[in-house]
Image (cartoon, rainbow, N blue to C red):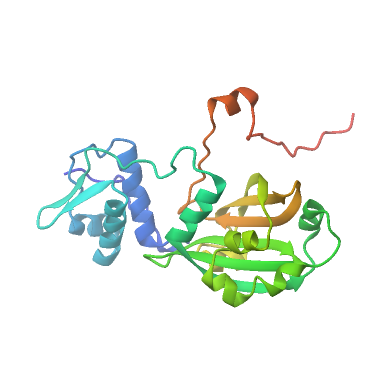
Amino acid sequence: MHQVGGKTAPVSAGAGVPLHRQLFLVLHDEIERGVLAPGDALPTEQALCDQFGVSRITVRRALADLAEQGYIQRRHGVGSFVREEFPADRSAPGRSYLEGLRQTQFETEAEIIELGVRRPPRAVARALQTTGELLHVVRLRRQRRTGEPLIVSDVWLPAELAGTLTESALRKAPLYELVKRTGAVVDRVQHEITAEIAGPRYAQLLKTAIGAALLRINRLIFAAGVPHHYQSVLLSPTRSRLLLTQSSDELEAADGLAIAHDVRREPR
């Protein structure tokens, strides 16, 4: 029977990531690297409990997540086995921006953290070319099945939408649909992807450790050729990935992807 991860348990209650998620990542990595090959049996639940120092509930939840994502097959009374074929990539090549939003809406449920009109940070005001107040919406999206926090969404919109984007409306319909109903037609989205460490607020919302790595996606959404609203999304890399698909024409034209280096030049 293959032993996962060597002799030392690579999971820790102090890591800021749920134990079942850590175990999922360890097993997922072993499968992806081929250490656990297609058809191989995973260690028994008790063996995983002993090796990683976790409860049976933790092990079963990690195995359930692997099975749900199509990496393993669980056979009652026999054990868990790596599937002969890996699951199809959910990234769906060619998926549009709106299709991605719809998928997120389907897989998660939102909790409104903040809603009100106030003055935006300077970077947001500069991006939206405004000096006035904006409608500010902060939401936490959780996975529907497990309740795990996945996304903190921080959105700045025109203040005149405050009467339309009420808490009641935001609970009934996704933001992009509500914005569409106001007559705004999105014609372009500018994305910026950065990384940062979690401060106390975002660490609490995303159930991770203060100082843990986070991914941030800033989106400047244009309507009728001008900036309309600004969305900033925070993710934990232990739970989420960023996927990018480009056509051959986009690759030839170097369209859709650029890397900016914020490095100060030393004066000569």
Q: Is residue 15 visible?
A: no
Q: List x then y, in percent, for residue 92.
A: 43, 41
Q: Is residue 123 left or right of residue 1?
A: right
> Considering depth in this image, is 16 or 14 the residue closer to the camera?
16
The quarter holding residue 55 reads bottom left
Screen quadrant of the N terminus: top left
Q: Is residue 107 left or right of residue 115?
A: left
**In the image, is residue 93 above or below residue 175?**
above
Q: List x then y, in percent, for residue 24.
A: 34, 53
Residue at the extreme left = 77
> Considering depth in this image, is 157 or 31 the residue closer to the camera?
157
Q: List x then y, in percent, for residue 37.
A: 23, 37
Q: Is residue 55 left or right of residue 164?
A: left
> Considering depth in this image, is 187 or 53 the residue closer to the camera?
187
Q: Which residue is drawn at 29% across and 44% down?
A: 6
Q: List x then y, in percent, for residue 153.
A: 60, 61
Task: Count the numbered circles shown.
Answer: 0
Residue at the extreme top = 252
Q: Is residue 149 visible?
A: yes
**In the image, is residue 109 above or below residue 211?**
below
Residue at the extreme bottom = 168
Q: Which residue is drawn at 74% across and 39% down?
A: 262
Q: Is residue 267 left or right of residue 221?
A: right
Q: Which residue is drawn at 76% across and 37% down?
A: 263
